[in-house]
Image (cartoon, helix red, strand yellow):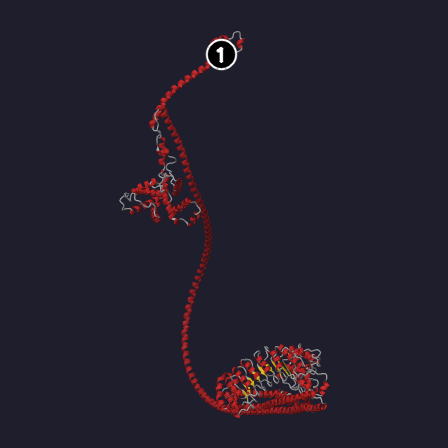
């Protein structure tokens, strides 16, 4: 009895009181009729789940009305439509009938279909999100549907495809496995996220596993044979592909580490470049942790020049040096790139200078990430100079770049002038005490910056605190602006005293 | 180097999974933030509730701080690892550099050693003594062993380093997993914290709202109650007031009722009286009414009758109108017909009139034609008769002459009468047109010029005697040259191909037609006018000369002098070398002063103008002249004919009569003689015939045959 109450309460809190009243009344009935008050409590969930009125016949004899079961009916013999629907559900795999039915019946069928039906039947027939929700929930315990545009169907196909690609072994797996799926999923997949590409299995598999400890040097000798799966056919088939997130590596290798598990060969690189060049719908391209060096980066960037829609390029955690950075700089002015991520590469001063040169007159780029490079003051100053003229960039990450006081002085000038930047990260540098003071000076004239990370950069705590106060004031002002944009001026004036108080 | 890569690689490998977690944490945080902000926004709408607003602000700040600190706490790990990585990289670079230096040193030393050894090999080759060679080989071996040992040592060192790095790698892995755990822990803690604080804050805010609501409720209830009380009091007051008013009104009503009753009664009495009066009046009215009714009925009858009558009249009138309409229509149609008829008539009459006009014209034409013909006939008859008469006259003259010469033996002179020379009808002396004259003149002058005849003195013209032909021609030529403007341009273009004389002729024709010169007289007038003008001009110029005897008035004299002058000039010009003329000219010159014979061309126009002005008047009286001409001739005719009859004078006739009688007598004598002669001849003839017959008989055969021949008998007589 309590069980039903809780479920109903969860389902519909507004009806809870009614149901409790109902319960009490039924309780009254039961008490009058019979000796088993505990029995119905164990049975009540059964009809709700099995949806078979016959199974609960015993119970129904005692209870006339069940409020929480919408499909319950007084009729003892099921309706013909019910029977038909049951039959359709049973034989859906062989004879899928859906579109011809009335909407309510369709809904009923969709609610009862098994999530294990072959995709060839369901993929292009069923659009109902609930069905795909059940499919997803059945296959994966954790589902972030928000990452897939809020569509369960898309999520199902994207993750399904990802799974197939992850476990594809070139040479042994049949490529038809993926290509067969293509006509089914081509309209639903918008994002391909693959964080591992398995290398082909070599013939001496046993010895390799045997003495893996010292095969590191040998593995490198056989490089030509370790090309990965070529994405060309798949990507060409996916008509709505917008995001490509690739990692040429193997996950969870642990102590089985081998260098040749992480090879991004030239052939891979060329085929990938051709693939992304042919894909005109691509908006986001990510190629991380794949040992992409200057040459490969240039090959890929060359294929991306003048791409019509590309907005985000992420080449973080690779081995890109100054030449690669120069290529990326060229790409900045030959595309509509909005986000560029070169974090954790080997970009040094000259590379940063070329990026700065491109940035100076760019009007597309919104975010630039150069974390964990080594651009030093040379590159830092160049970037600061570029930001004096740039009117577009909002986010800049220069953490861990061996920057010091000269960059800080220039950046303080930038802070005073620039009105577009909202977030700067200078953590893990050697700004120093004086640099911190100068940045504080620059901050005092700035009203737009919302985030300014100066952790572990040798800045005096006092100036860091004051900068934090200024940022807080800016954030408050921004919040006021967002809440009532019409009273823009007044809020700024209002935020003045607040600022002084803070 | 490889170790460094390895480590950095693994660092990446194991760090990366953290980022999404961090990101997720951040996203969670941001979600909470958004929630907080939403709550803020919700509360902001009730800004006037100061207490809740304060609470909300407070909690918002608190939450923001919490979130900031929390994210900082979480990201601190990342930052720490970043900086650790940087330090490691720097260290790694140092170590790498040292290692490379070391290796380079090693390479250098080993190279030196190797060079030493190889140089010793060269030395060894020169050694000839086996012991020395052996020794040397031993030392070489030792050296090599040393070199190898060094290398091995280095290798083992490096391997040890590698092993260390492996250990380091394992440690790093462990550390990183620890870090990840820490991060997760912190995130979870953060999430819990945030959730807790949010819940707390939410609770606080709710509480604050609750309190505020309670307060508000209480205050409102108080207000409500006071208001209700006031309301009740007022209601009571109103009720009492109302009751009082009701009483007042009742009293007033009563008063009013009594007063009304009295008034009612009074009015009733008055009204009853009125009713009586009115009834009386009604009776009267009724009587009047009846009377009126009767009157009206009678009137009605009368009117009805009248109406009937009027209807009858009306119908009559209507019928009349209809009839009149019919007649009107008939008349109209008739009128139209007549109009048509008259029009037709008119047309026919006009046609006839036209025909008559044409007929008349034709008649006129015919008349003119007949007149001409008549003229002609008349002329012919005249001529015929004249001829006949003349023949007769001639015969008479012949006869007369014969009589005179043969019979009378007198000399005969032919009588000279004017009418004998006349040919054709007298009155019809042809009026030549100006053009004809000019033409003739031109022809003549041309002929003259062609002949170069000196017989200029001869003048054949019917021109006025004073003017010579040449002068006239000159003047006309001048006129022709000067007044070209009177000729139409078309004509000029047509004239170009013609001969000169013809050209002149045609030009003059045009000019004359323009000037209105038609007849011979006009032409003479013109020429005269020219001459006069000149004379006048000359005289005015030559007045001072003593020898100018010619007066201005005497146009004739002047004309002659002028003529001579002109002729002279002409002559001098044309045949200036002829001496006799020259002499004559000199003679003449003595008589009249020398002057240019030509009229100056500039004067021509003036002269013409004057002439045209002068000519205008006589022209008007021209038409009646013509008629007279045709009538005038008859008296002369009879005279003429009469004259013709009296060609032979009566004295001569008497003579002739006498002569006749004498001659008759003579004739008689002659005839007698003739008769006698005839008798004589006949008698001779008879004689001869008788002789012939006698001869015949004498010679005839019968004579022979006959017994007595007569011949013999007779012969003798005949012989």
Measuring from the top left, give residue B48's x and y in whole percent.
50, 88
Residue A339, picture quadrant: bottom right
Residue B262, picture quadrant: bottom left
Quick one: which residue is furthest to the front in this view? B128
- Residue toward you, A31 or B87: B87
Report the residue marked by disc 1: B694
Residue at horizontal 42%, vertical 73%? Answer: B279
Which quadrant would the N terminus of chain A be assigned to in this image? bottom right
Residue at horizontal 29%, vertical 47%? Answer: B541
Measuring from the top left, give residue B66's x and y in whole percent.
56, 91
* Horizontal relation, residue B179 to residue B404: left or right: right
* Horizontal relation, residue B445 to residue A301: left or right: left
Measuring from the top left, give residue A27's x and y in whole percent.
66, 90
* Horizontal relation, residue B205 to residue B338: left or right: right
Residue A47 in view here: no
Q: In this picture, is B691 found above or below B453?
A: above
Q: In this picture, is B714 found above or below B234?
A: above
**Mark 1: secondary structure:** helix
- Residue toward you, B438 or B99: B99
Residue B512 in view here: yes
- Residue toward you, B654 or B371: B654
Measuring from the top left, give residue B597's x and y in whole percent.
33, 45
């Amino acid at each position: 009895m309590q069980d039903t109450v809780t479920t109903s309460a969860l389902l519909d809190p507004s009806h809870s009181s009614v149901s409790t009243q109902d319960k009490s009344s039924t309780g009254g009935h039961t008490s009058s009729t019979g000796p088993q008050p505990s029995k119905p409590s164990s049975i009540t969930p059964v009809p709700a789940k099995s949806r078979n009125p016959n199974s609960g016949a015993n119970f129904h004899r005692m209870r006339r009305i069940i409020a929480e079961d919408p499909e319950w009916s007084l009729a003892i013999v099921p309706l013909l439509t019910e029977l038909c629907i049951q039959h359709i559900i049973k034989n859906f795999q062989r004879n899928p009938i859906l579109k011809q039915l009335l909407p309510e019946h369709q809904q009923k069928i969709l609610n009862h279909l098994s999530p294990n039906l072959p995709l060839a039947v369901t993929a292009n027939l069923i659009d109902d999100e609930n069905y795909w929700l059940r499919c997803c929930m059945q296959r994966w315990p954790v589902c972030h549907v928000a990452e897939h545009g809020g569509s369960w169907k898309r999520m199902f196909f994207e993750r399904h495809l990802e799974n197939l690609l992850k476990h594809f072994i070139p040479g042994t797996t049949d490529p038809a496995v993926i290509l067969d799926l293509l006509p089914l999923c081509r309209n639903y997949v918008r994002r391909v996220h693959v964080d591992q590409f398995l290398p082909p299995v070599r013939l001496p598999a046993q010895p390799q596993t045997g003495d893996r400890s010292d095969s590191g040097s040998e593995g490198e000798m056989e490089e030509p044979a370790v090309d990965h799966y070529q994405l060309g056919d798949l990507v060409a088939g996916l008509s709505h592909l917008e995001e490509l997130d690739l990692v040429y590596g193997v996950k969870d290798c642990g102590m089985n580490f081998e260098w040749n598990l992480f090879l991004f060969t030239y052939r891979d690189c060329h085929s990938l470049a051709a693939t992304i060049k042919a894909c005109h719908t691509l908006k986001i391209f990510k190629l991380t942790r794949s040992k992409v060096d200057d040459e490969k980066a240039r090959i890929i960037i060359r294929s991306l020049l003048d791409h019509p829609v590309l907005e985000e390029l992420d080449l973080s955690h690779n081995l890109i040096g100054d030449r690669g950075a120069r290529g990326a700089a060229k790409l900045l002015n030959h595309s509509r790139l909005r986000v560029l991520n070169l974090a954790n590469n080997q970009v040094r001063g000259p590379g940063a200078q070329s990026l700065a040169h491109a940035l100076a007159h760019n009007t597309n780029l919104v975010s630039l990430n150069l974390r964990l490079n080594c651009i030093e003051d040379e590159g830092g100053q160049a970037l600061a100079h570029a930001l004096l003229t740039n009117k577009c960039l909002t986010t800049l990450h220069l953490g861990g770049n061996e920057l010091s006081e000269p960059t800080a002085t220039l950046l303080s000038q930038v802070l005073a002038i620039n009105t577009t930047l909202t977030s700067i990260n200078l953590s893990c540098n050697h700004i120093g005490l004086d640099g911190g003071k100068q940045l504080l000076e620059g901050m005092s004239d700035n009203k737009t910056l919302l985030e300014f990370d100066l952790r572990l950069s040798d800045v005096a705590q006092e100036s860091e605190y004051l900068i934090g106060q200024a940022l807080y004031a800016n954030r408050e002002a921004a919040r006021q602006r967002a809440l009532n944009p019409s009273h823009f001026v007044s809020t700024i004036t209002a935020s003045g005293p607040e600022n002084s108080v803070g | 180097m490889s170790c460094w890569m390895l480590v950095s690689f693994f660092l990446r490998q194991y760090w990366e999974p953290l980022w999404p977690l961090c990101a997720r944490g951040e996203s969670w945080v941001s979600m909470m933030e958004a929630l907080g902000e939403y709550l803020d926004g919700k509360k902001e709408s009730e800004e006037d509730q100061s207490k809740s607003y304060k609470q909300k602000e407070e909690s918002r700040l608190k939450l923001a701080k919490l979130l900031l600190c929390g994210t900082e706490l979480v990201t601190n790990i990342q930052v720490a690892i970043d900086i650790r990585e940087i330090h490691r990289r720097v260290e790694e670079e140092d170590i790498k550099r040292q290692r490379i230096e070391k290796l380079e040193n090693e390479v250098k030393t080993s190279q030196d050693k190797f060079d030493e050894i190889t140089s010793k090999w060269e030395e060894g080759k020169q050694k000839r003594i086996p012991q020395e060679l052996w020794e040397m080989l031993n030392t070489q071996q030792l050296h090599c062993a040393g070199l190898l040992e060094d290398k091995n040592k280095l290798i083992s060192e490096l391997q040890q380093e590698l092993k260390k790095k492996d250990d380091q790698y394992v440690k790093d892995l462990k550390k990183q997993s620890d870090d990840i755990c820490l991060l997760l822990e912190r995130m979870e803690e953060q999430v819990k914290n945030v959730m807790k604080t949010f819940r707390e804050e939410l609770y606080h805010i709710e509480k604050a709202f609750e309190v505020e609501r309670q307060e508000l409720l209480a205050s409102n209830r108080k207000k409500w109650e006071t208001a209700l009380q006031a309301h009740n009091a007022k209601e009571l007051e109103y009720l009492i007031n109302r009751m009082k008013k009701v009483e007042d009104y009742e009293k007033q009503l009563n008063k009013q009722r009594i007063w009304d009753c009295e008034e009612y009664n009074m009015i009733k009495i008055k009204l009853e009286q009125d009713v009586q009066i009115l009834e009386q009046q009604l009776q009267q009215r009724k009587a009047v009414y009846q009377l009126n009714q009767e009157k009206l009925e009678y009137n009605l009858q009368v009117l009805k009758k009248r109406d009937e009558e009027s209807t009858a009249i009306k119908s009559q009138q209507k019928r009349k109108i209809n009839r009149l309409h019919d007649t009107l229509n008939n008349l109209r149609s008739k009128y139209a017909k007549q109009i048509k008829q008259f029009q037709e008539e008119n047309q026919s009459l006009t046609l006839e009139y036209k025909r008559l006009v044409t007929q008349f014209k034709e008649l006129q034409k015919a008349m003119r034609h007949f007149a001409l013909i008549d003229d002609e006939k008349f002329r012919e008859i005249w001529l015929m008769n004249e001829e006949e008469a003349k023949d007769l006259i001639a015969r008479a003259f012949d006869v007369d002459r014969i009589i005179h010469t043969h019979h009378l033996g007198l000399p005969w002179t032919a009588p000279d009468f004017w009418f004998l020379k006349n040919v054709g009808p007298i009155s019809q002396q042809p009026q030549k047109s100006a053009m004809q004259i000019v033409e003739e003149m031109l022809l003549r002058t041309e002929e003259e010029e062609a002949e170069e005849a000196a017989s200029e003195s001869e003048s054949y013209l019917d021109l006025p005697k004073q003017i010579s032909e040449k002068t006239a021609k000159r003047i006309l030529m001048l006129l022709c040259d000067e007044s070209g403007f009177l000729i139409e341009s078309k004509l000029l273009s047509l004239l170009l191909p013609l001969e000169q004389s013809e050209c002149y002729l045609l030009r003059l024709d045009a000019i004359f037609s323009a000037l209105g010169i038609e007849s011979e007289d006009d032409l003479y007038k013109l020429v005269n006018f020219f001459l006069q003008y000149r004379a006048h001009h000359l005289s005015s110029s030559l007045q001072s000369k003593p020898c100018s005897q010619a007066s201005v008035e005497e146009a004739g004299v002047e004309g002659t002098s002028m003529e001579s002058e002109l002729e002279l000039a002409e002559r001098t010009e044309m045949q200036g070398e002829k001496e006799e003329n020259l002499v004559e000219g000199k003679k003449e010159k003595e008589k009249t002063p020398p002057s240019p014979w030509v009229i100056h061309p500039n004067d021509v126009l003036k002269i013409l103008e004057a002439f045209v002005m002068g000519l205008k008047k006589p022209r008007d009286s021209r038409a009646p002249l013509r008629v007279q001409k045709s009538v005038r001739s008859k008296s002369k005719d009879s005279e003429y004919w009469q004259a013709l009859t009296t060609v032979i004078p009566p004295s001569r006739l008497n003579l002739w009569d006498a002569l006749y009688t004498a001659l008759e007598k003579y004739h008689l004598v002659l005839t007698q003689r003739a008769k006698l002669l005839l008798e004589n001849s006949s008698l001779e003839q008879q004689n001869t015939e008788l002789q012939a017959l006698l001869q015949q008989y004498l010679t005839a055969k019968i004579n022979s045959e006959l017994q007595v021949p007569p011949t013999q008998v007779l012969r003798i007589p005949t012989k």
